[in-house]
Amino acid sequence: MKDYLDLRVPLRREMMTTVRLATGGVCSAAGMSYDGGEDCKVCVTESLLLLMRRGFVSAQVSFCAAANGGIQVRVTGEEGAAAVPLADEDEIALALLNALAEDVAMDRADDTIRAIVFTFGQQA
């Protein structure tokens, strides 16, 4: 499996633009359509915000080649966490992820979302 990019970022709102730009570059390198890249950027941003609201201080974002020619993204919270019940904005974020991405999965421990994994096909 080809690795595209592996980022570790502090979970602060001012970092979201940087991560979105990096995500767009990865999607372009993977040959994804413009719309697919935009959808992927939304999913990465929403995943980071979900983890930030769970109390994580930083996150790792890993992009690698998917079997369908697109990319698989894994967003993992690091440093800190809390069992925070899902709020309305979290439900909206989860709905967006499930509507835009393929094969959405979450790693949970102690009722806390610790990682979100999703896939985008080349023509997503």
Image (cartoon, grey):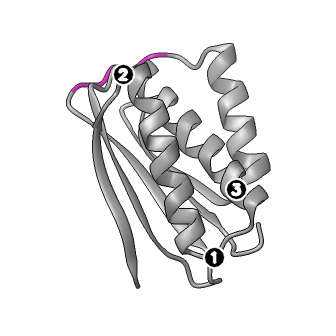
The residue at which mark 2 appears reads as: 12
Q: Residue at x 44, y 20 (%)?
A: 13
Label 1 and label 3: CA atoms lie apart by 16 Å
Secondary element at image label 2: loop
Mark 1 residue type: Gly
Rendered position, 121 above or below 19: below
Q: Which range is magenta?
A: 80-84
Asked if residue 75 lies in the magenta stretch, the reply is no
Mark 2 residue type: Arg
Secondary element at image label 1: loop
Badge 1, how many Cα within 10 Å: few under 14, some, many 20+? some
Q: Which residue is drawn at 45% across and 16% down?
A: 84
Asked if residue 81 lies in the magenta stretch, the reply is yes
Rendered position, 49 above or below 121: above
Q: Residue at x 66, y 18 (%)?
A: 89
Label 2 and label 3: CA atoms lie apart by 24 Å
- Kindly indicate whether the residue at mark 3 contacts the one at mark 2 (C-beta within 8 angstroms): no
The residue at which mark 1 appears reads as: 31
N-terminal-most mark, 2 or 3: 2
Residue 101: numbered disc: 3
Badge 2, how many Cα within 10 Å: few under 14, some, many 20+? few
Task: Looking at the picture, tell me which residue is in the foreground, 107 or 24.
Answer: 24
Can you say which quadrant of the picture contains the C terminus? bottom right
- Kindly indicate whether the residue at mark 2 contacts the one at mark 1 (C-beta within 8 angstroms): no
N-terminal-most mark, 1 or 2: 2
Residue 99 percent across, percent down from the top left: 79, 48
N-terminal-most mark, 1 or 3: 1
Confirm whether residue 82 shows in the render: yes
